Amino acid sequence: MRVDVLTLFPGMFAGPLDESIIKRAREAGLLNLQIHNLRAYAHDRHKTVDDRPFGGGPGMLLKPEPLFEAIEDLAGETARVVLLSPSGRGFSQAVARELAGFEHLLLVTGHYEGFDERVRAELADDEISIGDYVLTNGALPAMVVIDAVTRLLPGALGDDQSALDESFSHDMLEFPQYTRPAEFRGLKVPEILLSGNHAEIARWRAEQARLRTTERRPDLLEQRKMSESDSAE
Ligand code: SAM
């Protein structure tokens, strides 16, 4: 998959995307990540990319000209153009799965008060928020999206099954997990996990996932019920 990112802060991307699974996915050619500085598309001597909002109000907005030029240049015929914005639809594991199905994403990140509305209206295929809070710029949201999407690409995880059984995969949280030692400071691992009975272990895990989800995230179960009744219709 190719992912282009348009940002005013290319330096922020060094580090988080150069470690661990994402690093390996890049080295293996699963993720071709290209970071672009929006200022490269400004034409004046000061490399201006922002201006005051019409109608007044605090802060500055990203101007349309550099954004249009950059997006048209980088998206070509292939990219799905995704704006990162607090006004977007909520990011989730389901949205990450959806994005992982595209060959080419262009993630457009904002700064200041955000984008001139014409960028949204004319160029965006999608607009995503990573949560109901406001960050200073879109670099961290873009990295969140890249991380969540990359680990879903076939071959990115040591075992592709990992991405199928974890939290949110079936609108459920993950069941509790334990590793060696079987007893630590008097705390014992549930007997069933030591039994070797795979059918019973699977039943126990499913039940634990259901209990945990009911207790902590009943909204996920509601969502699941709704999508089951939608698909039954
Ligand atoms: N004035 C904007 C508003 O009220 O929606 C907030 C702009 S924010 C300070 C600057 C940029 O950070 C946004 O254009 C967006 O790219 C990014 N950003 C901030 N919070 C975000 C979030 N929760 N999800 C996605 N992007 C976010």
Image: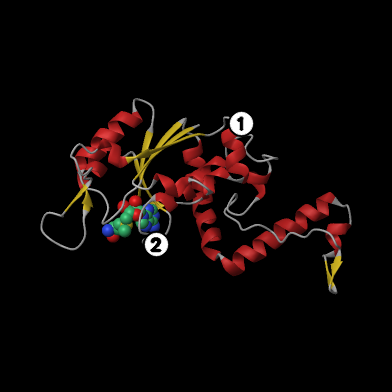
Residue at the front extreme, as displayed? 45
Mark 2 within 8 Å of ligand 1, using the beta carbon: yes
Residue under the point 55% across and 65% down: 218
Vertical comparison of 212 with 147: above or below: below
User: Residue 71, image x and y in percent?
Assistant: 30, 35
In front: mark 2 or mark 1? 1
Residue under the point 64% across and 65% down: 212
CA separation in Å, label 2 and label 1: 34 Å
User: Residue 190, image x and y in percent?
Assistant: 82, 65
User: Which amino acid type corresponds to the residue marked 1 in the rendered image?
Assistant: Ala
- The residue identified by callout 2 is 132
User: Residue 3, image x and y in percent?
Assistant: 45, 35
User: Is residue 58 in view?
Assistant: yes
User: Residue 76, image x and y in percent?
Assistant: 34, 26
Residue under the point 20% across and 38% down: 65
Is 182 left or right of 74, judged from the image as shown? right
- The residue identified by callout 1 is 28
Mark 1 or mark 2, which is nearer the start of the sequence? Answer: 1
User: Which amino acid type corresponds to the residue marked 2 in the rendered image?
Assistant: Asp
